């Protein structure tokens, strides 16, 4: 890491742990440019910086810069295409597709009940 702060000079609009308990993200609204900048810290010590912009079909993440704890860097571009309750994430490094993930919103009733910590039973 360089000696500069990993956070932009703007106040964050949202800062919270991600749904995964091993990561943390901070988001900054840049309203005059219709984008959200973000800084994402993962549990391995890596840091991603980038921005998200709306598109006609979803969102674009034009240049995410990831720096691993050993100093290795990667630049990726992602797009999210949204169609109702389904969306697809495509991530590229240059011309290479490095991953593609399909998501689908499902009703909570599709999932088994969760147990409460310490009670040993399922709801």
Image: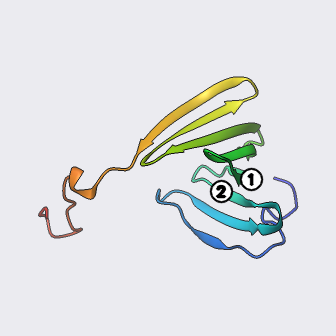
Image location of residue 1, percent across then percent down: 81, 52
Helix, strand, or loop for circle 1? strand
Q: Residue furthest top?
A: 96
Kindly tell me whether residue 115 is visible in this rendering. yes
Query: Which residue is at the front of the view, 106 or 116?
Result: 106
Question: What residue did someone put label 2 on?
Answer: 40
Q: Quadrant of residue 17?
A: bottom right
Q: Residue at the location (19% across, 58% down)? A: 113
Q: Kindly indicate whether the residue at mark 1 contacts the one at mark 2 (C-beta within 8 angstroms).
A: yes
- How does the figure colour the protein chain or chains? rainbow
Query: Which residue is at the front of the view, 11 or 59?
Result: 59
For residue 44, side relative to residue 84 (left or right):
right
Number of numbered callouts drawn: 2
Image location of residue 4, percent across then percent down: 87, 62
Mark with earlier residue (2, 1): 2
Q: Residue at the location (54% across, 32% down)? A: 100
Image location of residue 16, percent across then percent down: 57, 69
Q: Residue at the location (76% across, 38% down)? A: 75
**Relative to 95, does residue 8 appear above or below in the rendering?**
below
Image location of residue 19, percent across then percent down: 47, 59
**Relative to 28, does residue 62 appear above or below in the rendering?**
above
- What number is the disc on residue 10? none
For residue 75, side relative to residue 83 (left or right):
right
Helix, strand, or loop for circle 2? strand
Q: Residues within 10 Å of mark 2 (few under 14, many from 20)?
A: some
Q: Residue at the location (75% across, 43% down)? A: 62
| Quadrant occupied by the C terminus | bottom left
Q: Residues within 10 Å of mark 1 (few under 14, many from 20)?
A: many
Question: What residue did someone put label 1 on?
Answer: 49
Query: Which residue is at the front of the view, 112 or 72?
Result: 112
For residue 39, side relative to residue 109 (left or right):
right
Kindly tell me whether residue 111 is visible in this rendering. no
């Amino acid at each position: 890491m360089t000696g500069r702060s990993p956070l932009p000079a703007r106040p964050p609009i949202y800062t919270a742990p991600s749904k995964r308990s091993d990561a943390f993200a901070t988001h900054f609204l840049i309203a005059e440019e219709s984008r959200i900048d973000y800084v994402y810290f993962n549990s391995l010590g890596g840091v991603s910086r980038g921005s998200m912009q709306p598109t006609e079909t979803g969102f674009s993440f034009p240049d995410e810069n990831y720096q691993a704890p050993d100093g290795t860097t990667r630049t990726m571009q992602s797009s999210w295409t949204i169609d109702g309750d389904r969306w697809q994430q495509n991530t590229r490094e240059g011309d290479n597709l490095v991953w593609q993930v399909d998501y689908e919103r499902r009703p909570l009733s599709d999932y088994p009940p969760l147990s409460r910590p310490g009670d040993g039973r399922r709801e």
